[in-house]
Image (cartoon, rainbow, N blue to C red):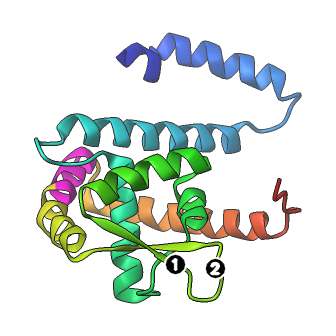
Amino acid sequence: MREHFVPSREKEEEIQAHLKAMAGGHDIRGMQISHHIRLAGKLFDMAVTRSAQSGEISGPRMGILMRLYMEAEHGDPNGVNPGALGRFMDVKKNTISALLDGLEEAGYVERAPHPTDGRASLVRITLAGREFVRATTPRRFKFMNEITSVLSTAEQDELIRLLTKLHQSLSTHVKNLPCDEA
């Protein structure tokens, strides 16, 4: 499976040459950056899932819990709309529903009626969910630090700075694109 994600140097050069030919003279670095970010995200998720200890939850479910935890601490303690969570996680409605169902069954989240929209609900983290996040986050952070330890502290700081700058650029571009709510 490693070859699927990390091609050999020769294969990578072959792919790069092909992409440059397809680009019609345009620079391909933007596409390369996008590809590496997506791939890194997938590999991070795989690594976290494989390293999970018994009783831990999947990366996507932990991502939801972390978002709800931070929302409760620094945002809206009333909860988050499931649709907004789905967009945050970049998953379809049925997938976010399944993820939330599992978290609700475990007692980590609860759904409550939306205070102003009778058709909608809000999801918020429970006390058990908060305790779970507090108990498992240090180990997860330690593992993520081990994964990124191949980079020096200065390189990590520079990567964070560059990714933050890229994030700001992407946010600006997304705001300027037409919205398709279909």
Side of 22 relative to 78 (left or right): right
Note whether 149 is above or below 67 in the view shown: above
Q: Are marks 1 and 2 in contact (CB under 8 Å)?
A: yes
Q: Position of residue 25 (x, y in %)?
A: 86, 31
Question: Label 2 is placed on what type of residue?
Answer: Gly
Which residue is drawn at the image coordinates 62% and 12% (left, top)?
14
Question: Label 1 is placed on what type of residue?
Answer: Pro
Instruction: Identify which residue, 38 or 50, lies in the foreground.
Output: 50
Q: Which residues are magenta?
A: 140-150
What numbered label is drawn on residue 60? Answer: none
Q: Can you say which quadrant of the picture contains the N terminus?
A: top left
Instruction: Identify which residue, 6 or 28, lies in the foreground.
Output: 6
Note whether 94 is above or below 109 in the view shown: above
Note whether 123 is above or below 61 in the view shown: below
Residue 91, visible in the rendered structure: no
Which residue is drawn at the image coordinates 21% and 66% (left, top)?
133
**143 within the magenta span:** yes
**157 within the magenta span:** no
Which residue is drawn at the image coordinates 40% and 69% (left, top)?
67
Q: Position of residue 16 (x, y in %)?
A: 65, 22
Label 2 residue SS: loop
Which residue is drawn at the image coordinates 56% and 45% (left, top)?
94
Label 1 residue SS: strand
Q: Quadrant of residue 23?
A: top right
- On the image, numbered disc 1 is attached to which residue? 113
Q: Position of residue 118 (x, y in %)?
A: 64, 79
Q: Position of residue 162 (x, y in %)?
A: 52, 62
- On the image, numbered disc 2 is attached to which residue? 118
